[in-house]
Image (cartoon, rainbow, N blue to C red):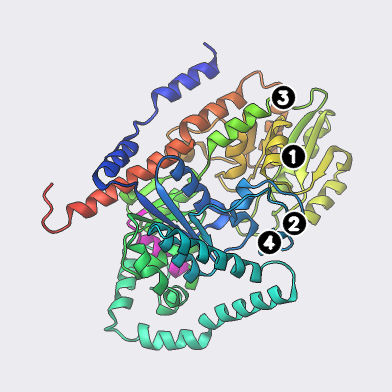
Amino acid sequence: MTSVDTSAAMMSALRPQPQGVDWHRRFQEEHGRALRVLHLGNIANNAFNNARIQRQHGIDAYVIAYENYHIMACPEWEEAAFEGDLGDPFFPDWTKVDLGGYQRPRWFASGPLKLCCSMIAAEVGGRSDLADEIRRSLDRARQSVSGQTASARATRLGQKIARRIRRSPAMARDLFLRRVLAKDDPEQMRLAAVWRQGSAPASPPSAADFASYRARLAPLVGLLDQFDVVQAYATDGAWPLLARRPYFGYEHGTLRALPFQDDSLGRLTATVFLGADHVFVTNIDCVPAARRLGVPPDRITPLPHAFDDAKLVEFGKKNSAIRPPSDSVVVFHPTRHDWQDADPSLVKGNDRLIRAFASVAQQAPALRLAMIAWGRDLDASRELIRSRGLDKRVEWLAPMRKPELWRTYLRSHAVLDQFVLPSFGGITFEALALGRRVITNVDSGMAKDFFSEAPPILSASTESEIAEALRRIVADQDDRHGIGAAGANWIRQYHSAARIVELQLAAYQRQIEAVRDHQPGHEG
């Protein structure tokens, strides 16, 4: 048995029992329907991808993305095949491209919040005709703000002004006088009490911190009661918190620094996650942050990013003929170029890679680097490459959609992610699923705590560590050590859609049964 086979056997032996799936089966038998979950918010399509894999496992999941029109918060980005210019990525005009007949799923709503709530309510209530009518209104509303027409730009400007008015100093002062200084205001006292449960080094939340959420709460109040589970992304837990409804908080980098800032966003974030009945933490370096904030350990579930591994496995099978070249060693760095900012949540360390590549390339004439031309510091990266005489060794690729990105992974000997934060996201786990070796910065100890087993990654952060990892790729061009295959096995065991759904169901079960057990007249 090879080392890869042994690793796969050990992973199989450690596979958790699907207790959450079994509980959901009993739930369906008892209630005559599937568990109903509402996902609030959709940054980077995390809610969409989560709801999609939940639905694949029989959960009745819905998404309200409300006023998030960014290209990477749209179902089309994940599921449709298209070519062409969509214009502003924050307000893409999907009418400008051929989507091949693709239509958004009925369980996904994006646009003005009130219309989103109405559409989802109609879907849940079985009123398909009404849902279709509202869906058409949402389509028109999105079209009115998308694209580069004068009318669309004017609509976006009007919405921006409206948001600023809601957060204006005059309103903040008014809310402060009416809410914060009114010591007998039970609502503000409740929010402050939630905040005091933790250890955020800031001041208690003011009513102004929640003003924007409170102003738009009404359409959600009744809708929340139609769901067994409300899962709120980033700060969108403010809505169920204000409505006094149970909710699960979902962080995607949100807890890294925000809740420790003494500003409106920091106080809002801290209060929202401290008020959650349970918190899903999707970044390995954010588990310590959640504990430092004061979220009790029994209310934290480390949860891999929403990810459909079966989709990648199927893609790999269909494209098995695509292989890295035999006459050169190609390493692919698709990460955005962002390395001059001090914000650790943004910076990627691209400059470290370029310098490391320059040192290794001197002794490895077959080594080539492919990068995507995007990011705030793209020009700085180009200049650094020119200054090191690497222009002929670096290939610049245009931004690409997932299918072509995955083909590029398959054509590469290794994929390079980021080198600053000891964590990883989509680039790393997609490359692992396709059997590619990955070089990125990962804290193996934290990764083991998070996943139960650290992924087989070539971990590197400093310039010298990156250079050493590149030398290992050059020395083992054909991956005779089976690191790529071990990575694919690790994904199947620890980062699969089935495991992601199972972890969520287990947390849902604990919360729902705890609420039931505390209801008057219930006997265990």
Give the farthest residue toward the top.
Answer: 1
Residue at 65% of width from left, 74% of height from top?
156
Q: Nearer the viewer, mark 1 or mark 2?
A: 2
Element class at badge 4: loop
Instruction: Tell me if mark 2 has few (under 14), some (14-19) or many (20+) residues whose alpha carbon lies within 10 angstroms of its own.
Output: some
Does residue 262 appear in the picture of this structure?
no
| Residue corresponding to mark 2 | 377
- Residue 281 locus on image (x, y percent): 44, 49
- Residue 519 locus on image (x, y percent): 17, 57
Mark 2 / mark 4, whichever is N-terminal = 4
| Residue corresponding to mark 3 | 321
Residue at 36% of width from left, 52% of height from top?
36
Element class at badge 3: loop
Q: Nearer the viewer, mark 3 or mark 1?
A: 3
- Residue 430 locus on image (x, y percent): 60, 38
Residue at 33% of width from left, 39% of height from top?
20
| Residue corresponding to mark 4 | 92
Q: Which segment did they paint magenta?
A: 266-278
In this rendering, the count of numbered labels is 4
Q: CA distance from mark 1 to mark 2?
A: 18 Å
Instruction: Tell me if mark 4 has few (under 14), some (14-19) or many (20+) residues whose alpha carbon lies within 10 angstroms of its own.
Output: many
Q: CA distance from mark 3 to mark 1?
A: 31 Å
Q: Nearer the viewer, mark 3 or mark 2?
A: 3
- Asked where in the image residue 209 lies, by quadrant, the reply is bottom left
Residue at 38% of width from left, 41% of height from top?
503
Amino acid found under the numbered disc labelled 3: Ala
Q: In the image, is 173 to the left or to the right of 398?
A: left
Element class at badge 2: loop
